[in-house]
Amino acid sequence: MKKRNLLLMTGSSLFLLATIAVAADEKMPAFESLDTNKDGYISAEEATPSKDLSEVFVKADADGDGQLNLVEYDSVALAKKQR
């Protein structure tokens, strides 16, 4: 079961890298600066200062829990950097 979850997360991350399009004119803020309550996740509300992240928040939330963990956030940042 753990291997299945790991494969699912890996596949989801790769999917995000291939499909998330973010605007190239805004630099992505650091994860820590957006995680204002310091719980290790970025909520939709915490993402609002970043237009780029707000626009792709639902797609970036690979596990559908309503918040972004560091892996999900890094997928968005990496996709933006590759553009």
Image (cartoon, rainbow, N blue to C red):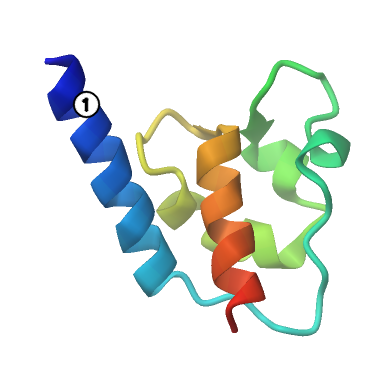
**Residue lying at 21% horizontally and 26% vertically, measured from the top left:** 5
Quadrant where the N terminus is found in the figure: top left
In the shown orientation, is residue 20 left or right of residue 49?
Answer: left
Quadrant where the C terminus is found in the figure: bottom right
- Amino acid type at circle 1 is Asn
Q: Position of residue 6 (x, y in %)?
A: 26, 30
The residue at which mark 1 appears reads as 5
Q: 65 and 82: which one is in front? A: 82
Q: Is residue 23 above or below residue 78?
A: below
In the shown orientation, is residue 4 left or right of residue 72?
Answer: left
Instruction: For label 1, count other residues whose C-alpha is less than 10 Å away and answer few (under 14), some (14-19) or many (20+).
Output: few
Q: 45 and 18: which one is in front? A: 18
**Residue lying at 72% horizontally and 46% vertically, measured from the top left:** 47
Identify the image quadrant of residue 27.
bottom right
Q: Position of residue 9 (x, y in %)?
A: 30, 38
In the shown orientation, is residue 59 left or right of residue 69?
Answer: left
Q: Position of residue 11 (x, y in %)?
A: 25, 49
